[in-house]
Image: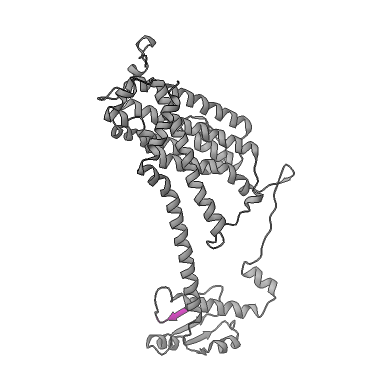
Amino acid sequence: MHNLNTVISFEVVRTLKKKTFWVTALSFPVVITVVFAIIFFSNQATEQATLDTQNQKFSLAITDESNAITPQLITQLGAKTLTDKQQGIQQVKDGSLDAYFYYPSELDKQKVEVYAKDVGLFDNSRYQGTADALLNQSIATTVDTETVAILKNKVDFSSVTFKDGIEYDGFKQLIAPGLFLVLFYILVTMFGSQMLTSTTEEKENRVIEMLLTTIKARTLIIGKILSLIILALIQIVIILIPILVIYLQFGDVLALPNIDLANLPLDPVRITVGAIIFALSFLLFTGLLVAIGSAVPTAREASGFFGLIMMLIFGPLYAFTLFISAPHSSIVTFLSYFPLTAPIPLMLRNAVGNLTIPEALIGIAVLGVSAAIVLAIAIRMFRYGALEYSKILSLKSIFATKKNTPRR
């Protein structure tokens, strides 16, 4: 194993020199930045368009059979009143009026009707907005401010929940442990291809033949796996830094949810459990892809197995509501303890807080043992498949007797 550091440094440096690595690594932060920029400029444009619309004047006539509209407001708008509905509609049609509002006698049963001249898809909203504002302002003059606030659903609420006698905010509690689930999803989707091809590149260009003359197969494959983990950590940093900068510097401008990071609750038990599950899940996933890459002769054939692994890993996301509403059901238990589906259920349940300590320990044990077995199989596959260029390894050759096992 004395060449392990050489393998790790070579793999890491070689990958960092590739343009594709940086394109992949920076694509997510760039996309996030572009999305936030679009949201910002869209909000700015919408606010300006709304202000311009509000300042626009238009000729208006009103028929109020409900007697709900205050005459003073009609006068302030410069509108006129009509008793004949059809007359108002006709005046809009012939262009002598820009808009006509008809308020029926029973507002709770009938619709307020708005007839207006087309001024564009966006600007047409000003008519209904004016009709609604006119009605709200008229009603507001007849009741007290408290009733108005209730009717407009503008009453603020302050909720405090307790768990075991201690103040508990479920949403804030899931943020820290939930980050491990988000990072796992991002890394696997963005980094999976690199894991898959890490062991097939040298096979395709026959460089592996030269490497195995100086480095043992076990040292080489362990070095590759450790280098993949190091590269994954680099990607985590690349992803998190831009997101934190955007949130801290431009959160108010972009109207992002205001979360007080200084007072963010940090449950050491759930964070530790989440970190362990994340590490073992990533190690398991890495081992699976490295094993596949070792067993097949080309990266093209290896990609055929990638979809199956992704389906097993992320398939449980389709049942995520069960992990929250029925965490102790038989299907959730099975998905939580079956090695290839366990990562998502365990991390999600840990984030929302319904994963008990005994369940977490069982899940960690399952993932730990599975990761160790997969890594052992990956090393064994590499010993047999490193120099196999023509076919996929068979199970019989992979699990051959010890006396047939290659020395390197």
**Residue 163 placed where, x, y %?**
70, 44
Q: Residue at x 51, y 51 (%)?
A: 243
Left or right position of 280 against 164: left
* Extreme residue in the left direction: 390
**Image coords of residue 371 (percent x, y):** 48, 27
Q: Is residue 386 above or below residue 130?
A: above
User: Could one spot residue 77 in this view of the protein?
Assistant: yes
The residue located at (52%, 61%) in the rendering is 254
In the picture shown, does residue 44 fall above or below 174? Answer: below
Q: Nearer the viewer, residue 5 or 81?
A: 5
What's drawn in magenta, residue-wise? 113-117
**Towards the viewer: 182 or 136:** 182
Majority SS type along the magenta span: strand
| Residue 341 visible, this angle | no
| Residue toward you, 261 or 85 | 261
Residue 328 position within the rendered picture, expressed as x and y whole percent measured from the top left: 58, 35
Left or right of residue 144: residue 114: left
Viewed as shown, does residue 109 lie left or right of 314? right
Relative to residue 156, is residue 170 depicted above or below? Answer: above
Q: Nearer the viewer, residue 84 or 211?
A: 211
Would you say 18 lies left or right of 185 here?
A: left
Against 133, residue 291 (above or below) is above
Q: Quadrant of the N terminus?
A: top left
Identify the residue at image location x=40%, y=87%. Answer: 90
Q: Residue at x 51, y 85 (%)?
A: 63
The quadrant of the rendering that contains the C terminus is top left
Measured as percent of width and height from the top left, residue 240 is found at 51, 47
Q: Is residue 114 magenta?
A: yes
Q: Magenta span has 306?
A: no
Q: Residue furthest right?
A: 165
